[in-house]
Amino acid sequence: MRIALLAATAAIAMLTSCSTGPVRRVSEPAASLQQLQVRPDGNWSVDLRLHNYSSIPMQFKRVQLQMSVDGQPAANLDTVANLQIGPESPDLIKLIVTPTLAGKIAVADSLTRKVIFNFRLQGTVMAAPEKAGERSFKINSTGSLSPAPGLDGVLR
């Protein structure tokens, strides 16, 4: 009797899962800095990491983020991304940004003293889930980078 009940329950579960298809979950994406390099002209080359936590591909259209250090604006990361990212996967966007004076001082201090550089990213990321309209996702995250040994002017 118990075996028959278990078999019937398993059959119903299998039929239910087959009829609904794969789960299409859209989750908030994340944004973080993977690397910051000070260029000879004083601007920064920034590797911005976008992570799609959804179970479906997302077309990332625009990134509008403000990076701050100790509550002071450090740089604007504003770009048209036009980047397709697969389900539950990350990808990078390379940006050249002009830092503020506060940002330049904070990065120079971190590189000179070889200490961690703490920052905050706030703003929005515009993305379109597969077969759906574009949505605006709020980003509010903190992160840190450390001086990369042997690489002058690079924080990772």
Image: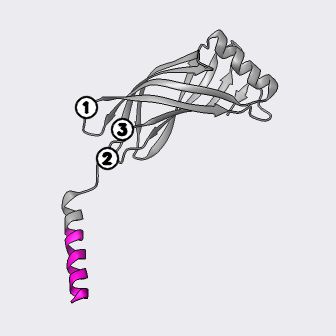
Between 92 and 4, which is closer to the camera in this rendering?
Answer: 4
Read off the residue under disc 2.
25
Image height of 6 relative to 126, above or below = below
Image height of 92 relative to 24, above or below = above
Q: In which quarter of the image is the N terminus?
A: bottom left
Q: Which residue is drawn at 50% across and 38% down?
A: 91
Q: In which quarter of the image is the C terminus?
A: top right
Residue 58: which numbered mark, if any? 3
Question: Which amino acid does the dot numbered 3 rest on?
Answer: Met
Quarter-of-image position of residue 149: top right
Q: Determine the CA span between mark 1 and mark 3.
A: 11 Å
Would you say 52 lies left or right of 69 here?
left
- At mark 1, the secondary structure is loop
Stretch of the chain drawn in magenta? 1-15
Q: From where the camera sits, is residue 78 visible? A: yes
Question: Which amino acid does the dot numbered 1 rest on?
Answer: Gly
Residue 50 coordinates in the image, percent (x, y): 48, 35
Q: Which of marks 1 and 2 is in front?
A: 2
Between 82 and 77, which is closer to the camera in this rendering?
Answer: 77
